Amino acid sequence: MNEELSVVSVRINNASFIIPQFFIDKVIALKKVLLVSSTLGSRNISLLKKELEKSHIKTNEVSFYELSDNYLFDGVTFVNGSFPPGKYPEESAAGRLAVRLCAANFYIYEDLSPLTVVDRRIVKDSKVIEELSLSEAGSLAFYGSVLVHPEAFYKAVRKNTKVYIASLLEDSSTLITDTPSNEARKRKIKGFQMIEGVSILTIEGVSLQGRPQTASRMCSAVGSRGVSILMLSQGASESSMSMVVRSSDASVAASAIDEAFEKEISEGSVESVDIDSDNAIIAAVGDSAISSTKVFASFFNALSSLRIGIKLTTASPHDKSLTAVISKKDVKKALSALYANFYLLKRTISTGIFGVGNIGKALIEQLNGQTEELKKSGIDIRIRALANSKKMLLNESGINLDNWKEEFDKKAEPLDIDRMIDFLDSDSFPHTLMIDCTASDELPHKYLSCLKRNIHIVTPNKKAGVTPYDYYQELLKTCAETGTLYLHEATVGAGLPIISTINDLINTGDKIKSISGIFSGSLAWLFASYDGSMPFSSLVLKAKELGYTEPDPRDDLSGMDVARKTVILAREIGHSATLDGMSITSLVPEQLRNVSKEEFLSRITEMDEGMKKLYDEAKSENKVLRYVGGVDENGRCYVELGKFAPPSPFALSTGSDNIISFITERYVKGGPLTIKGPGAGIEVTAGGVFADILRLCSYLGAALW
């Protein structure tokens, strides 16, 4: 072995391409080099020679046919001119030289992307494959990898020359070796490839059972027409046989099979060939692909998690690959999911947050604080997009949550909701999540199209829950059909487990008869604090100052927020409730409902007299006022200012706590099931949204408990 000699072949497809500095530095570092190329070009040769001279490295030129075994190697020798004919003339010529001269290294450079686990046109940040065995390289080449076929370098590998497939576009390379490192052995799957445009030809019939010659007849018929068979599979019952060919050969192959089985087809014991087109073969390549049960499980789980149908599959230890035929339209999603399952954290989710105000900001902080813990559970919630009502920030690989505000201020562009959703729904990620932390009326109308695209939705926005009932039903139907989740725990009770409790009760066979509760944290505080000693309007203004109410307190006092929550709960337990015609007791006097916010605040004392009267009436009955909402046994929703006395949990409520009571078939004799806790607040609402995100991760297979 000539330990100082390296053979370097260079193929440049773009005539205007200029060799990069890292390539020049590599040649200088190698020192004794045979540089084989007919495409380097005079400009690149001059540039390289100039840099070599600066480093005091000699240069020579010789043709391939003039190079003898006893050539004195010194510096860099440019081997140019013509090469022996073949599919890879330069690479094959360089390979012969590497073998003949016992070179220590053989580099194959080309002005193409490096050899990556998945084509970067599908997964943009796919990792470069560090090491491959000769058999793995052959399998990847067969399935369409942008790779010089091993016939150009296999002899060099057999001679223990280190062969590197390298890129001129970035400083990276893949080592091809017959003695893989321990680290390489640990990686069961080295790459994923595809062959698009294939068809499945199937012949079926009871007369095929017990006839061992079926496969040979099919293969002979197809082979006689010069058609290559990519895959072959027979059903265990022996009543059907399928083969995969390129779609361009499908009609010829089908005709050949029909002719071969003409007698059986005419008798009706065998059906004519069925052609299933618009498919693709995807392959997971690795020397240990077939021997590992974990590889099998991960491969099929990745596809099933996205509901990608597998039409045909084979596992060949000789090909070092696990293959499946799927619909062509699912290829990008499938390869992205496989890459994520084998090379990223198991649950990598392309995530966007609409609304980076109070709740959105708190959610970002909570997510950022838990990033490392989540990664321990195989979860990567990749925040790739953020938006407020006017601008959006998009980042392909993910936004740094440590300084997202600064990045948003500097790089945010005008908001385009559809473009942001399209950006999130990237084929580079197996799962997509849209988080709606807004109070927008527009965004919920995008939910249906998102769910149909397999984009999961998590939101505290109540608007979708009270959309026309037909639309709401369509949301649920789409979730059932696609396996996509619409999670909205934080729409009722902020971070309290209200909707999840309903689901648990129903899923375990209980029947919820009625729900009632204090659903507004701001109104809970107002009536828990109101004792008649000061005007009610003064308490409202104080609540506004403390941030308990909306900037316009009428948004709380009107009861509409509570009404939305009751409709959401009614629908959760199976009623077709709507806001139309609902009984809602508004605390805003009639004459103040349609005036400006400023005028309302200046005339707010006009509500004091009526409220004091109601308070005195309740007090005379030893009761207290509480603003409640509910769903009765008939599914009727109501919102009212009621009077309650102990031991009612409503009468005993304090502060801004929400209290929700459920009367069910199980929870009736011993009293209702009651949930109490903070039902408002930025942190607890963000926590409720975060909890829904973790529910999604659990649904996707993360082990969180």
Image (cartoon, helix red, strand yellow):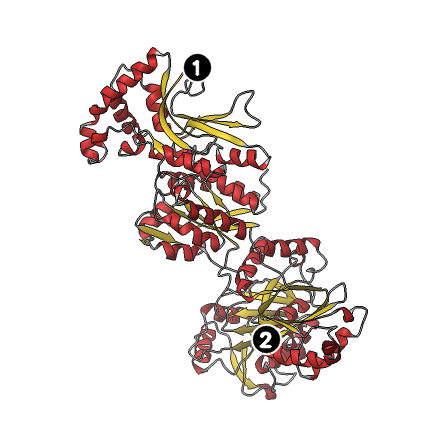
Task: Identify residue type, mark 1.
Answer: Pro
Q: Residues within 10 Å of mark 2 (few under 14, many from 20)?
A: many
- On the image, the x and y values in percent for residue 655 come to 38, 22
Tally the marks: 2
Residue 370 can be seen in this image:
no
Q: Residues within 10 Å of mark 1 (few under 14, many from 20)?
A: few
Report the mark closest to the observer, 2 or 1. Answer: 1
From the viewer's perspective, is residue 205 above or below residue 646?
Answer: below
- On the image, the x and y values in percent for residue 161 come to 66, 71
- In whole angstroms, how far apart are the C-alphas of marks 2 and 1? 77 Å
Reading the image, the residue beneath label 2 is: 247
Residue 423 or residue 40, whichever sits in front: 423
Compared across the picture, whether 534 is left or right of 344 comes to left
Residue 403 can be seen in this image:
yes
Q: Secondary structure at mark 2?
A: helix
Name which residue lies at 80% across and 72% down: 212
- On the image, the x and y values in percent for residue 313 come to 67, 63
The numbered dot on residue 503 is none
From the viewer's perspective, is residue 664 above or below residue 336?
Answer: above
From the viewer's perspective, is residue 703 above or below residue 483?
Answer: above
- On the image, the x and y values in percent for residue 306 come to 56, 55
Position of the C terminus, as image quadrant, is: top right
Position of the N terminus, as image quadrant, is: bottom right
Closer to the N terminus: mark 2 or mark 1?
2
CB under 8 Å between callouts 2 and 1? no
From the viewer's perspective, is residue 273 above or below residue 554?
Answer: below
Reading the image, the residue beneath label 1 is: 646
Q: Secondary structure at mark 1?
A: loop
Task: Identify residue type, mark 2.
Answer: Ser
Residue 16 or residue 142, whichever sits in front: 142
